[in-house]
Image (tube, rainbow, N blue to C red):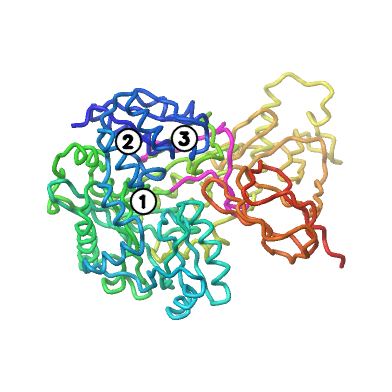
Amino acid sequence: MIGSLLIANRGEIACRIIRTARAMGVRTIAVYSDADAKALHVREADEAIHIGPSPARESYLVGSKIIAAAKAAEAEAIHPGYGFLSENADFAQAVLDAGLVWVGPKPASIRAMGLKDAAKERMIAAGVPVTPGYLGEDQAPRRLKAEADAIGYPVLIKAVAGGGGKGMRRVDDAAQFLEMLESCKREAASSFGDERVLIEKYILSPRHIEVQVFGDSHGNVVHLFERDCSLQRRHQKVIEEAPAPGMDAATREAVCAAAVRAAKAVDYEGAGTIEFIADASEGLRADRIWFMEMNTRLQVEHPVTEAITGQDLVEWQLRVASGEALPCRQDELSINGWAMEARLYAEDPATGFLPSTGTLREFDVSSHARVDTGVEEGSTISPFYDPMIAKIIVHAASREDAAAQAEDMCATTTVWPVKSNAGFLTRLFAHPDFVAGNVDTGFIERSLGDLVSAFVPDEAWASAAQWMIDYDANMPPRRGTPWHELSGFRANATGKRRVAVEHGGEVRVMDGLDRPIFDLLHARKFGDTVVVFHRGEGWTFNRTGQGRKAGGSAGNGAIVAPMPGKVTAVTVKEGDEVAEGQPLLTLEAMKMEHTLVAPFPGTVTGLAAEPGGQVSEGSVLATVVRAAD
C-alpha cells in the first residue's frame, strides 16, 4: 500500500482525499498557492508545500512544481483529484517518469479518451452506440457549417479536447452557426489549448446518464451503476442523483454493459466515468442512449455512487494504484436506496448566477448529512478558482425521501455576505416536476421563473426590525441618534418601539412585534446590519433615519465588470451605435465566460477594455450613451 500521498489539488476534493488517506494510515501532503495559504486542505494535511502565485496557471497547473513538491516531501504517489491536471496525459507520464505512483489511469488511456473524435471512433469499434455527428479532420468553418446543415438543427458544437461543459455551444439554426462556432473555438483554445471541434446532433429531450466504472492492473473492470446528472445550467451540473429515475433493470444492464466495454477498449485502470446522452422523449430506452465521452478521473458527483453502493471510491483508487485487485467483484455490488448531491455555489441567481467572492462571515450547513467542503466560516472565496462552496449529499430509502432531505438541508443552509444558490437549490428540490422525476438537461432554463426569486417576504422585514429593537433594549441609550426611539413618528402612536429599516434601497418604518417570529426565520446581527435567513436565502437589512423610499437612477449606461477577470473579446469600438441587449464584450472569470451587453440603445463611449486585458471588480469598461428618443 502507498505510504505517502501528495494531492495535486485544492478545496473540497483535497479535503475529501485527505479524509480517506488518513483513515488508511497514508501520510498526506497538500500543495497551495498564495490565495490558499490559510485554506482548510492545507491545515488538514500532514504537510503542506507552497507552489506559487494565486492564478492556477502559475501554481496548480504547473506540473513541474507539483512533482518537485512531491520529491521534496518524499511522497510516494500523486493523486490529481479532478480538474486541473487530472486528465493531462503528459503530466501523468511525467509523474511516472519521476519514479512516483500516479493515482489514475495510464497515460495511454487518458490520451485515447481525451480527444472526443478519436474516442468516438474507438467506441464505434467496441460496439458502443454513439450520437450521430461529424468527427472529421476538416475544421474549415464552411465545412463544419455544411455538416451541421446536413445533420439538422439543433446541433451541438463541442471542443474536441473539452470537458466540464467548456467549449460547448448549442446552435438552433443555420444563421447562428458561425457566430457560435467562433465563440466555442475561442473558449476551447483558452481552456484546453486546442480550438478543434466536433458536431453532434442535439437531443431535444436529453437526459445525462453516466456510469461509474473501475478497472485494475489485473484486467478486471466493473461498473458501480449509473448516475443521473440532467439537472444542469450552462452545461454545468447542479444536482446529481443515483440511481437514475425511470431506469428499468433491462436498460440499466444494457447501458452499464456498454460502459464496461468502453473501459475495456482502452485497457482502463482506476476510476472513470462513461457519459451517455439519452433521448427521454419516450422514457429511458437502451436504443435511445448514446455514448458522449469518458472522464478519465474521479467525478465531482462520486459521493452519490458511494452512498448507494457503500464503497469508498478514493480507497479503491489508492488500492488499485498500489497494484491490488479491485475490492469487489461485479456480483458483490448492488444498489441500496437513493442518493442526491447538490452543488452549493458562491453565486447570485438574481443577477444571472454571477460568481460571488469575499469572506464567509456566516457559513452553516446542517450536519445531518454528508457535506464535502474545502471552506469554513472565516474562509475566503477568491476569484481565482471554481466558486463551489460545498457539496451537500443525502441518502435515503426512496427518491421521495432523498428529495425531501435535500430540500431541508439546503433550506437550513446559511451563507453571508457571499451570495449563494442555496435558495435556488431549495426551490429546485421542492419543484413538483423534479419530485416526480420529470427532468431533462433543459429543465432549469425552462423553470428559472419558478426557481429564481427576488421577493423579500414581509416576515423578513418584521424579523429584522424586531432584532434591531430587541438589541437596542439590551444596550445603553445612545444620545444623539434620532432613529433610536421612533415612537412619535405617527399620530395616535401605540407606544410600541419603532425602527426605520432599509433593504435594497427601500425603507420601511416598522413597529416592534407582540411576539417573536424566530421560529420561522433565523437572523444574525453584524454591527448595524441584520441578516435574515429563510429557506436558503439571506436578506441584508440596515437601520436608517430616512423614512422614505430611496430612489434609484435608470443608470448612465456604465458597463461595469461584475468581478475580477480577463477580457476575452470586444465586439464593438468607440462610437459604435448599439441596440439594447447587443453584446459589447466578453469577460472570463472563475472558469466561466460572461457576456456584457448594452442596457439600452445608444452610442459606445469611453471604451476601456481590450482582449487579453485583466480588469478588477467594479471597473467601468465602457459607457453607452442613451440614444435620443
The tag earlier along the polypeptide, 1 or 3, is: 3
The 10 Å Cα crowd at callout 1, few under 14, some 14 to 19, many 20 or more, is: many
Q: Position of residue 111 (x, y in %)?
A: 31, 53
Between marks 1 and 3, how big is the CA–CA gap? 33 Å
Disc 3: which residue: 59
Of the two numbered discs 2 and 3 in the rendering, the one whose residue sits closer to the viewer: 3
Q: Is residue 375 visible?
A: yes
Q: Is residue 429 visible?
A: no
> 471 or 311, which is in the foreground?
311
In the image, which residues are magenta? 343-370
Q: Position of residue 48 (x, y in %)?
A: 39, 25
Q: Work out whether 137 lies above or below 614.
A: below
| Residue that numbered label 2 is attached to | 17
Tell me the tag on residue 524: none
User: What residue is pinned by disc 1?
Assistant: 340
Across and down, in percent, residue 99 comes to 25, 33
Residue type at mark 1 is: Met
